Amino acid sequence: MKRIALIGIIVSDKDSVAKLNELLSQFGEYIIGRMGLPYKERNISIISIVIEAENNIISSLSGKLGMLDGVAVKTVYQKGEN
């Protein structure tokens, strides 16, 4: 069953950006939308991803993103079934 999830990402290591974008491209067919905000005063980037996919796909993307150096990830799932 597909679910909607919001993946919040904070990137503090610019060297991980290329790998992060590569991962997002690999999962692109599931991504509904993406918004990125550079926060120059803190030297970080804040990215939100909205995705619709099965739990295992969402977890796989979140896990791979979280293993990148200088990348913090949190995922929020839609409640219930729709």
Image (tube, rainbow, N blue to C red):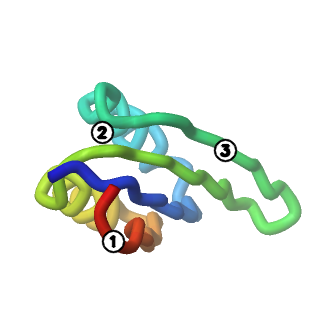
Instruction: Return the x and y of residue 44 as percentages of the image width and height.
Output: 68, 60
Q: Position of residue 30 (x, y in %)?
A: 31, 35
Which residue: 23% across, 64% down?
63
Quickly name the residue at label 2: 23
* Picture quadrant of residue 40: bottom right
Q: CA distance from mark 1 to mark 2?
A: 28 Å
Q: Nearer the viewer, residue 77 or 11?
A: 77
Q: Residue 5 has which mark?
A: none
Given the image, on which type of amino acid does mark 2 rest? Leu
Proximity of marks 3 and 1: CB atoms separated by less than 8 Å? no
The residue nearer to you, when weighing 63 against 41, is 63
As measured in the structure, the alpha-carbon distance from the residue carrying label 3 to the one carrying label 1 is 28 Å
Which residue corresponds to mark 3? 36
Vertical position of residue 39 compared to residue 70: above or below: above
Callout 3 amino acid: Gly
User: Crowding near pointer 2: few (<14 within 10 Å), some, many (20+)?
Assistant: some
